Amino acid sequence: MTEPLSPLDATFLELEEADPTAHMHIGAIMVFDPVPGGGPPDIDVLREHLGRRLQALPRYRERLSRVTTGGLTWPHWVPDERFEMSAHVGRAALLPPGGEAELLEWAGDFYSVRLDRTRALWEMAVVEGLADGRWALATKTHHCMVDGVGSVDAGQALLDASADPAPAPAPAPGPPGRPRPRETEVATRLVGAPLRALRAGADLALHPHRAKEVLDGARGLVELLVRDELLAAPRTSLNVPLAERRRLATHTVALDDLRRVRTVLGGSVNDVVLALVTAGLRRLLLARGEEPPTGGMRAMVPVNVRAAGDHLALGNQVTSLFVDLPVAGDDALDRYRSVRDEARARKAGRQAAGGRTLIELAGLAPPILHSVVARSLFAARLFNVTVTNVPGPRVALYALGARLRRIIPLVPLAADHALAVAALSYDGDLCLCVNADRASVPDIGEVVRGMADELDVLLGSVGVGA
């Protein structure tokens, strides 16, 4: 039995179809020590390793039933009859000396190329030539397949908790499926939207305790729409049409430093991340001679709504908060308190429920109309920049006996959004990766320097560092 895309998953296909410069894939670069014996792994050994592990994730051997959305039904996932591991796992080599600059330059090009929609929507590359014999595994997965949290779960399925793990048991076969006749399948989807609406009403009638949940969602939707129409995000030099190529910059910090700040100043680690991004954006605007907006720049912050037991569940299970970042403030402590209080107010409000309600209502629209709603969910009028923070593995992991040293995350750019920041924690560190349009953000280094300086100031304010 084939599975149709959900409306939210299909959104990321529609965003690409609406703008040829959009690349709606997420990804990560995992940097490893040399394998036992030295250097990177043999490519055939790695492909065989991935082939065994991906048996737990059958979606990675499936493709879309058609390469575009629209019409009266959603594309659905079908087996990729042409699937070959060699078509999805390739090799690349860095120019000497194989440092951070060379890795990020290569990665900018790697992430500037869309995935082939006629195949399974993922790609990996073994990157050789890193300094000290290290190597990297760069991953690229279409956002219609997986969200940030789901990609971390999937990534961990490919990794081991020790350098010499026990053989993994073979996955148990799933229950046999009965394919439905095509006519029945199409008819089911044609009436799916009104049936979903009827089911929602019946569910509310049978479960009155959901009334508050629905009411919160409705109120949150009003809050979200009013914010969009009456308090639109400001226009900045980062909200311009994009070119097709990307550039990356990174900054890695110790998680303990972020915890020290939040312990003394209150809030959460995510609040510290938002404060660092605020400072980076402020520095970039000032370096451009641009007056930072007095009302702040608005960040879209994805929120995971995945159930605790949904490990290895693919698809997108997120909603969003919209947080104003006080880029006009000239004092680091004041900026932090403002971010902390703003994020707290957004979490305590109904915005996340409103965002989810909007997505659910958008899902009732037929595919032929859904793309209009999809574009509005990612419009520059609603937010200026995406900032995502995904908790990653807390302990060291391994692949083929080689220790994983760091993970560089990637979040895509929506149309008219020239910059986005992804944060991901791993083994005591947190990597902030800035993904930017190569043409309009040649000064990406200003963002990284602003984040680094801000953390130094915040640590000094809580009695840490020089």
Image (cartoon, rainbow, N blue to C red):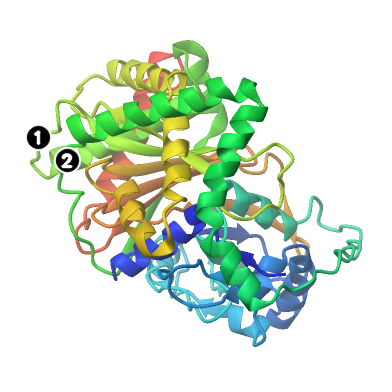
Determine contact: label 1, label 2, CB under 8 Å: yes
Check the picture and name the quadrant holding the C terminus. top left
Q: Nearer the viewer, residue 162 or 367?
A: 367
- Where disc 1 sits, the SS reads loop
- Residue 75 visible in this rendered orientation of the protein: yes
The residue under label 1 is 291
CA neighbours of label 2 inside 10 A, class few (<14), some (14 to 19), many (20+): many
Say which residue appears at 31% left-offset and 56% top-offset: 372
Query: Which mark is first along the chain, 2 or 1?
Result: 2
Q: Nearer the viewer, residue 239 or 372?
A: 372
Residue 442 lies, in percent from the top left, at: 22, 58
- Residue 135 visible in this rendered orientation of the protein: no
Q: Residue furthest bottom?
A: 82
Q: Nearer the viewer, residue 217 or 263?
A: 217
Q: Quadrant of residue 441?
A: bottom left
Indicate left or right for 228 with 454 as reference.
left
